[in-house]
Image (cartoon, rainbow, N blue to C red):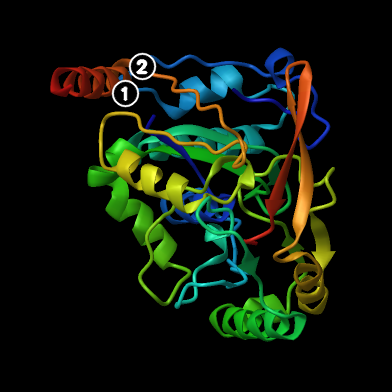
Amino acid sequence: MFCSEGGVDVGNVDEKAVRMRIPTGEIINCEQIKNQIIPESLNSKARDSISEFVFDLFSVFVDLNFTYLEINPLVYSQDRDTIHVLDLAAKLDQTAEFESGKSWNAALKLNEQDPITIDFPAPFGRDLTREEKYVADLDAKTGASLKLTILNKDGRIWTMVAGGGASVAYRYVHLRINTLF
Amino acid sequence: MSARAIREHDGKLILSKYVKSLRGGLQVARIEAETKSSIVGLPETIPATLQGSLNTKEAVTLSESDVRKQLDGIFLKAESQHPWLLSKKLVVKPDQLIKRRGKGGLLALNVTWQEVKLWISERAGKEFEVKKKLKNNTFICLFKILFF
């Protein structure tokens, strides 16, 4: 999605932005991007630079296994022909860590003297409790989905939302306990 | 689920390394203003992230002056790793997946490094309220400012 308006008060991006749908595996080029989503109201040099940037961005998005990438606002300086990323939100596919992890960490290394690995912070800026952190560590190591969220540490109601993985595990434990007694 | 959000700082570093056409250049510095605290009854120092644990009754945080000392150490380290902090106009914000930081008073624009240090010192380790709008319901999250 591309929109020539941006910033905090951009409003409903869904209505204002132009969309370009790229099926998985399809190879695209810079020209297609320029024609389909970069506004014609911009001058030729701006259109070329911005579409080249978007093309590079998309390549990195695919090659490094991003699942989400939003830049708002994106600033283009006409005089210097430079692009500036002022704010960014991104998600990575953690199961792709085996193939892209080195590349992610290599980027972080630019800024740090000590070796560093990328981390995935808890949503909404929450701290994890020790129990939540333990389950999160388990979750990272498996294709199953394991989540623990403490909403109220003094509460006495536990909801166990189970999909395909956990429900099988609960059922197995339940059956084992029943057969033992 | 394997789609995991990353910090803005990390995302920007990844783009600046791999997106050739970001000729404008990107300079980011990570300030980990995480205050370490010790939990009553346990021998070692445990990071602040464990304060919410069900198994502890009380968490004891460091005194104001100890927090100050820790922050000073963190700032010095940042200055030596990123000397440009001292000469440029800066933007500072928490980088822990909080949205609408500007509207929540968690954003300082066009400030000097001295102002940044003061701004972080006033906020690090403190609890802030963030209203999250979820369709028709709003709920409030309390969180501790940890990273910038």
Which image quadrant for residue A22? top left
Q: Is residue A144 visible?
A: yes
As drawn, A69 above or below A35: below
Q: Residue at x 48, y 24 (%)?
A: A31
Which image quadrant for residue A72? top right
Residue identifier under label 1:
A166
Could you tell whether A133 is left or right of B48 in the image? left
Tag count in the figure? 2
Q: Residues within 10 Å of mark 2 (few under 14, many from 20)?
A: few
Determine whether label 1 and label 2 are within 8 Å by CB: yes
- Are labels 1 and 2 on one chain? yes
Measuring from the top left, give residue A136's x and y in whole percent. 39, 43
Measuring from the top left, give residue B107's x and y in whole percent. 79, 54
Q: Residue at x 62, y 63 (%)?
A: B58
Q: Residue at x 70, y 44 (%)?
A: A75
Residue identifier under label 2:
A163
Measuring from the top left, give residue A77's x and y in whole percent. 71, 48
Quadrant where the N terminus of chain B lies? top left
Q: Residue at x 80, y 79 (%)?
A: B114
Measuring from the top left, give residue B142's x and y in whole percent. 72, 46
